[in-house]
Amino acid sequence: MAVIDMRAMRYINLLDKISKVKTRRCFVYNNSILFAVNRTEVSRAIGSSASNIKRIQEHIGRKVRVIKEANGIANAKEFIEDVVAPVSLRSVEVRDGVMVIVAGNTQSKASLIGRDKQRYFELKRIVNDVFDMDLKII
């Protein structure tokens, strides 16, 4: 079970106040705030002409993205692709309880890992919170 810190709770409450969409998942990845919401409420969370996203960005001063929430391992590849977009992935697999992301080329792998492994640690935390698994990038 993921622990929600006070900052994430404030972000979640702000999304609820502005767009009237409830979520339990808020992540920081690549200096952006990601909200994982139910698939049926993504467009409502974004708002007309991205008005809700713009209002939230003005409040917190960071880039905000809304992605579809994962419904188990079946949607893992789609969820991870949404998180790391625009970086493209070759595949996402589960091997021995570890989520393995195959980047494809060295540039994609470098983008996934980031300077000082910052993006890797952020993605590892997201994978652990959502799927309760460890992460490996190859």
Image (cartoon, grey):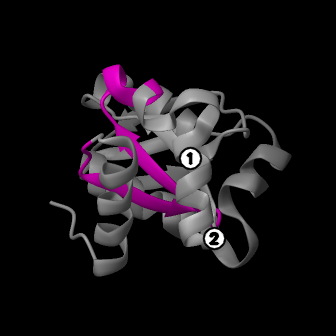
Q: Quadrant of the N terminus?
A: bottom left
Sequence order check: which comes first, mark 1 or mark 2? 1
Residue at 54% from the left image edge and 68% from the top image edge: 59
Q: Which mark is residue 23?
A: none
Exactly how many numbered labels are in the figure? 2
Q: Position of residue 39 (x, y in %)?
A: 35, 23
Amino acid type at image mark 1: Ile
Q: Which residue is mark 2?
A: 61
Q: Which residue is mark 1?
A: 53
Q: Which residues are magenta?
A: 22-43
> Helix or strand or loop: what does disc 1 sit on?
helix
Q: Is residue 33 above or below residue 54?
A: below
> Helix or strand or loop: what does disc 2 sit on?
loop
**Crowd band around label 1 with a 10 angstrom C-alpha radius: few (<14), some (14–19), many (20+):** many
- Taking depth in this image into account, of 48 and 5 the one nearest to the observer is 48
Q: Is residue 134 visible?
A: no
Residue at 51% from the left image edge and 33% from the top image edge: 47
Labelled pair 1, 2 in contact (Cβ < 8 Å): no
Q: Is residue 86 above or below residue 129?
A: above
- Taking depth in this image into account, of 29 and 119 the one nearest to the observer is 29
Q: Please, which residue is most extreme toward the right here? A: 107
* Side of 107 where 94 appears, left or right: left
> Residue 35: within the magenta?
yes
